[in-house]
Structure formats: structure tokens, C-alpha cells
Amino acid sequence: MFANARMYAINPAVAAAWRALLEWAATRAEVDFEVIDYPAPAPLPALWARPDAAGVFMCGYPLSQAQPQPRVLAAPVPSPRPYDGRPVYWTDSIVPIDSPITRLEETFGRKFAYTTEDSQSGYQAPRLLFARHAHGAALFSATVGPLVTPRRIVEAVVAGDADAGPLDSYVHDLLRLHEPALASRFIGSPRMIQPCWRLSAITCGSRCRARRSYARTRYLKTSFSAPTCWIRNSVWPSGESASNEKSPRSVKRLRRSSMGAP
């Protein structure tokens, strides 16, 4: 079996932190799987479709459409205040820092970027929002994509190849933390708050026998400031929520379920 966190591995340092977290989970759960690299532009749907997935981040839209349904193991709870302690996210519509655009309607008639059509934050959420305005007509002078990754959305907007584009809010916050120089070159204006989905979840394939229902998702609290181990600056929970009781309990349940226990 394998695990992968490419969706939120925004750069090599953050990728290393995700790898450390997944390897820790494998050790603590006593489940044998390999944390693999799967760099862009390799297609994520092919990764998500593999039955030997022990744990992969999966986007909300393909998760809702997948048959058979993957089993959901965990979902991060980002620590910034706008998330209100919930495992949710939204799409920020980003523009260059010096852009005159201040309202959603001001993006119409311009170049708008997108990731892929199977992305919730990078395509489907903006598509639903824009449908209210389009009335069957084209809203933009051009669409730029598929750009595959959120980082390429940012690069296209910063470089002027696109006037605006959608950005996963969790990716946006990770960039603010880890790459403030890049994050300072664009701004989320305006935010597309709806639809607001449960944050992309860690799922497993049909060969992973973890018995989890969507309603009983385990939440992985992620803090950007708590003083714990070095992983804290990327993906790791604060000391009061993770290292005391929630992590060991979750690991024990994962261990039992992966071994076929009820």
C-alpha cells in the first residue's frame, strides 16, 4: 500500500513535513505502507483510483463522485481563525497585488485561470458561482488552463498570464506561512465563500479495510504556530490537541480497522 499528500505539498519543505507525518502514522498504526512521490503534472485521478491507497489527500468533488466511495480517514482542521475550528475550505479568487479588480464582476471580460475540471476549488466551485452570472454566455475573454496545480494558478496570475484565478484557501494559507514573498504578490479579492466544502480528506482505497463512514471522519487539527516538533510549521497539530489523546486514539482505531477488526 502507499500514501501521498501531493495536494498540499506546496514546496519541498512542506512535502517533507507531510512525508514525516504520514511515516509517523504508519509506524504508530503498525500499518505497512510506503509514502511515495507523485509530482505534477502526473494526473491525480489516476492516483485516487488505485485500490492500494492507504492514505491520500483527495479533492472534495472527485470524492463525492467516486464509485465505489473511498473510505475517509481524516480531514485537517486548519488553525487560522476564518476556519472557525472546522474541517472546511473555500475558493479565493486571486488577482495581482496591483490589480484594479476589487469585485467579482470586474473579472468578467478578462482572462481567468483554472486547474482541472475535476477540481472542486480550482474549477467546480467557480463554475457554480459564475453560472449565476453567465446566463449561457461567455464571461471571460479567455480561460487559461488546465494548469493542474494551485501553484501554477498563482504563477500565472503573478506573471500576468491570467488576470484572476481560483485558489484553494488552505493552499493560500500555507503559502502565506511558507512563502510570504510569493504570497505578497497577489491578493484574494473577492473571496468566493460558497460553496464551502469539507476540506480535502485523507482517504484510502478498496484494499485498505479501514471501516470509516463520512459522517465519522476523524479531524486532524493543524496549527501554524503551536510550539511542537518541526512539523508544526507545516501540517502538525498543536500540543494540546494532538500529542495527548486524539492522535493515539485515532492511531489505535486505524490499526484495528486496517486489520479488519470491527
Image: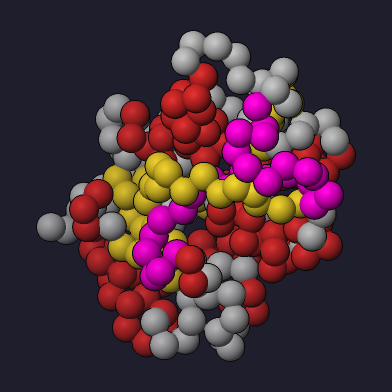
Membership of 101 in magenta stretch? yes
Q: Is residue 150 left or right of residue 254?
A: right
Instruction: Name the residue: 30% across, 27% down.
Output: 67
Q: Residue at x 28, y 30 (%)?
A: 68
* Residue at (33, 35) in percent of width and height: 64
Q: In this orientation, does residue 26 appear? A: no
How many numbered marks are there? 0
- Quadrant position of residue 63: top left
Residue 95 magenta-highlighted: yes
Question: Which residue is at 63% across, 42% downward?
Answer: 103
Residue 239 vs 114, above or below: the answer is below
From this viewpoint, which residue is outermost toward the left? 262
Whole-percent x and y of residue 223?
A: 52, 75
Task: Check the picture and name the quadrant holding the C terminus.
Answer: bottom left
Lateral position of residue 66 relative to residue 106, left or right: left
* Whole-percent x, y for residue 163 in the image: 76, 34
Asked where in the image residue 241 lies, by quadrant, the reply is bottom left
Residue in the foreground of this view, choosing between 174 and 138: 138
Q: State the image coordinates of residue 236 (x, y, percent, origin top left).
A: 53, 73
Name the foreground residue: 57 vs 113.
113
100 w.r.t. 127: above or below: below
Q: Is residue 19 left or right of residue 157?
A: left
Q: In the rendered view, would you say 37 is above or below 119? A: below
Check the image and name the residue furthest to the right.
159
| Magenta residues (range) | 83-108
Q: Quadrant of residue 251?
A: bottom left
Instruction: Please indicate, yes or no, whether residue 184 appears anywhere in the rendered image.
Output: yes
**Which of the colour schemes (rainbow, by chain, secondary structure, one colour) is used?**
secondary structure
